[in-house]
Amino acid sequence: MAQKKRKHGKVEARKSKPLIQFKLGVLLLLIVIAFGGCFALYLISATSQPDYWEKEIMASSQQETEESDENAVPIETKSGEPSAAVNPVPQSERADDVHMQICAWIGDVTELTTYYQTASEMVFPDAVSGMSESEMRSSAKKITERDPLAIYLWMNTPAEIADIADFTNILSEKTGETPVYILSALPAADGTDNKQAINDWNKQLFSLADSKGLHYVDVSTALKGNNGFLAAEYAKEDALNRAVGEIILTHVAK
């Protein structure tokens, strides 16, 4: 090995260079090549599956649908009604009395439809509770043939909520975009012992309407006195019917 002398006479060994010099660029290039090779092998393996592209398209479509649902707003139907009802229906500008004539009325509506001018062919005072499915479909068909602006269902007496649910399902199926309103039962009369039963019934009606996108009109709260029973001012039939009609006409969903 070659040696050289220092100025002070000491001999120093000449350093030899390493056989391989480290270069950052070469390392990065090797990483890129390795990654590219792995990715190429993955693509070859994945695309060899016959349903690969179908799965990819479906996954992409599902992601877009989920993102769209997150940013969705209530969709309006042809009649202008939003797909999701706001319940209880908030107070609105008073509709004209003709509204009562061009809507269908179902259930405990005889007194109301006698007091207000309504079309006789639009009144269906049948008790929904206890109806068979064929009877429900028959009633829904008759209502559909009348082509009402809206459908009002009023069940003043607590019954089987499942019957009301079944009937509203058939109504929605038959009438499509025609809005369906469920009226709450009247408050219990002062001195009776069914106040809690009626309050529970109204809660069930509200839940039913809200879960199915139907409109719930809270007649009960507006007619209650401080004691939770029907206010004394509505004890007379005419005053009661007038008040209920006014609540309906001033609570029309937009």
Image (cartoon, rainbow, N blue to C red):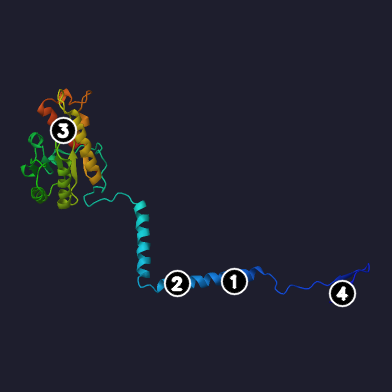
Indicate left or right for 23 with 152 as reference: right
* Dot 1 amino acid type: Leu
Asked which secondary structure carries label 4, the reply is strand
Residue found at the far left of this picture: 120
Residue found at the far bottom of this picture: 1
Mark 3 or mark 2, which is nearer to you?
A: 2
Residue position marked by numbered label 4 in the rendering: 3
- Above-or-below relation of 58 to 128: below
Asked which secondary structure carries label 1, the reply is helix
- The residue lying toward the viewer, choosing from 31 and 90, is 31
* Dot 4 amino acid type: Gln
Label disc, if present, on residue 58 of the rendered structure? none
* Dot 2 amino acid type: Leu
- Seen at 21% across and 32% down, the residue is 199
Residue found at the far right of this picture: 8
- The mark that comes first in sequence, 1 or 2, is 1
Report, in whole angstroms, how far the alpha carbon at label 1 lies from the one at label 3.
82 Å
Mark 4 surroundings within 10 Å by alpha-carbon count, few (fewer than 14), some (14 through 19), many (20 or more): few
- Above-or-below relation of 197 to 174: above
Label disc, if present, on residue 244 of the rendered structure? 3
* Dot 3 amino acid type: Val
- Which percent across, then down, holds residue 226? 23, 23
Mark 2 surroundings within 10 Å by alpha-carbon count, few (fewer than 14), some (14 through 19), many (20 or more): few
- The residue lying toward the viewer, choosing from 128 and 72, is 128
